[in-house]
Amino acid sequence: MSSERQGVVSAASWETWRTYGLYLSVILLANFIWEVLQLPLYTIWESGGKREIAFAVLHCTAGDLLIAALTLGFAHMALGRNWPSGHFWRVAAGATGLGVAYTAFSEWLNTSVERNWAYSDLMPIVPLAGVEIGLSPLLQWAIIPPLGFVFVRWQQTMAKSRDLT
């Protein structure tokens, strides 16, 4: 392979990793904030101690980061191998859809089957295929990933405009 071709591959690879890093950084911060704000919608807010609540927020935020990384990776492989330079929004939609679907499954599993956590009376409930799922976690995954992708695209546009000047 020529050195020119290797440079192109390296630049494309660097752009992909940089985009992953930027997206996941936004996801980490936004999900941490969301997890803190939605605490009153879960029973741990009333029944848990400070350490238990802090652990839950950090644990859930780490889980959110893992879900975001995996859903982006799966969407990237399945829907747009040359992402982020091509098929950006198709991959973004796929990652968001996977995130919402996983969240619905996880909420059902953890509230109805395993009973690892419970909703407080403040949680709005969505009946979904005969199962009751909390609205807040569904909105979390319907809102935060698209906002993360919008931010990443905005950053890419700003970087390109700086390069042109």
Image (cartoon, rainbow, N blue to C red):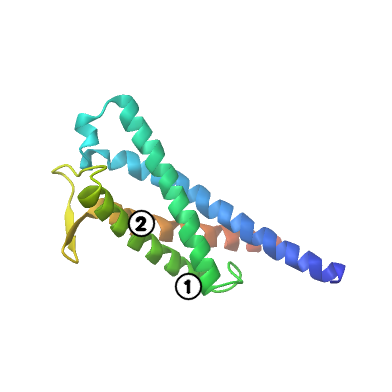
Residue most toward the left? 121
Residue 69 image position (x, y, % from top left): 50, 55
Q: Residue at x 23, y 51 (%)?
A: 113
The C terminus sits in image quarter:
bottom right
Give above or below for 102 relative to 40: below
Q: Residue at x 44, y 64 (%)?
A: 95
In three-dimensional space, the C-alpha distance between marks 2 and 1, rounded to whole angstroms, equals 16 Å
Q: Residue at x 31, y 32 (%)?
A: 53
Please rate how many residues cluster around mark 2, counting C-alpha atoms within 10 Å: few if below 14, some from 14 to 19, many from 20: many
**In terms of depth relative to the viewer, which is nearer, 10 or 152?**
10
Quadrant position of residue 81 = bottom right
**In terms of depth relative to the viewer, which is nearer, 54 or 145?**
54
Residue beneath disc 2: 141
**In terms of depth relative to the viewer, which is nearer, 158 or 79?**
79
Residue beneath disc 1: 90
**Sequence order check, earlier mark of 2 and 1:** 1
Instruction: Name the kind of residue labelled 2 in the image.
Output: Trp
Residue 145 image position (x, y, % from top left): 42, 58
Q: Is residue 97 visible?
A: yes
